[in-house]
Amino acid sequence: MQLIRYIFSKSFLIQIAIALAFVTVIIIISLYWLKSYTSHNESISVPDLEGLTLNEMKQVISDNNLRFVISDSIYLPNKKRGAVVGQNPSPESKVKENRNIFITINAISPEKIKMPMLIGLSTRQARSIAERHGLIVDKLRYVQDEASNYVLNQYYRNRPIDPDTKIIKGSSITLICGINYQQSQTHIPDLFNNTYKQARNNILNASLNVGRVIYDKSVKTERDSITARIWKQQPASNRINGVRLGTKINIWLTADEEKINDISAIREQKEKQREEYLKKLKEEDNLLKRNQAYAN
């Protein structure tokens, strides 16, 4: 009884009230400190660092209360040496103060590799090995030989290059391949909607060469040129009549999505009409055969 009487006494209730007030104050102070410590609802927009020199990048990072880590170094011949060529997080991303920005720098000196031995391999094998070494097979040049599509020589800057010769990684090379004129034809692939990289691979896979590359007015930046897609090619795709190995394929590219979609719709309509026409021919042919069977 005494315990119950004490619990409902004025002094006990006052002590409970004081304890609750104390806990509430502690919670408020903790939340305020945590909010201040973590900069709650405060963030920094990551600046665009691409193209800046190392010193310029350091200054921009410092001005924005950020940090940086150089995570990689690559060599791009068309970019300024020692400049930033990549970053993570990307520009305009929202981050906290003192966040590390991971930087990729364009190397001052190009990386060199040894030229692999490609002579005697099939064209496809040679291309695969060259690409694994970081080289680009830019052109296939064909000369008369009994065996088609086997590498007879390897060229760099229009001159033969011996295996193990030091060469800049990312360089373009030419393969001199054999061609038997009695077995010298290939078919032109359909390149519509391919990026340049995809088209180049498909063209070389068909033992053909990239000809002229024409970008329309919608391609304004380097990024546009990477993502642009083919809307026209010359000669056109042909799975029936073959062309000579090494034939050049001219390609036209656009970054205009509406243009691609319009052409895609036209192509789908033409394909539907072609299928309907073939179906009609087949039905007429079957009808003719039945009539001939009845006549006999």
Image (cartoon, rainbow, N blue to C red):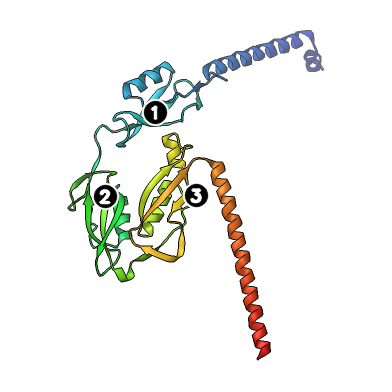
CB atoms of marks 2 and 3 within 8 Å: no
| Numbered tag placed on residue 120 in the rendering | none
Tell me what residue is drawn at x 52 percent, y 17 percent: 37
Q: Which residue is mark 3?
A: 193
Q: Which residue is mark 1?
A: 50
Callout 3 environment at 10 Å: few (<14), some (14 to 19), or many (20+)?
Answer: some
CB atoms of marks 2 and 1 within 8 Å: no
Residue 294 visible in the shown view: yes
Q: Nearer the viewer, residue 292 or 245?
A: 292
Q: Is residue 187 left or right of residue 134?
A: right
Considering only vertical position in the picture, is 144 above or below 110?
A: below
Q: Nearer the viewer, residue 45 or 52?
A: 52
Considering only vertical position in the picture, is 20 above or below 166?
A: above
> In which quadrant of the rendered image does the C terminus lie?
bottom right
Q: Which residue is mark 2?
A: 173
The residue under label 3 is which amino acid type?
A: Asn
Tell me what residue is drawn at x 46 percent, y 58 percent: 237
Q: Nearer the viewer, residue 17 or 265?
A: 265
Q: Tell me where residue 62 appears, x and y as whole percent.
A: 39, 17
Snapshot quadrant of residue 288: bottom right
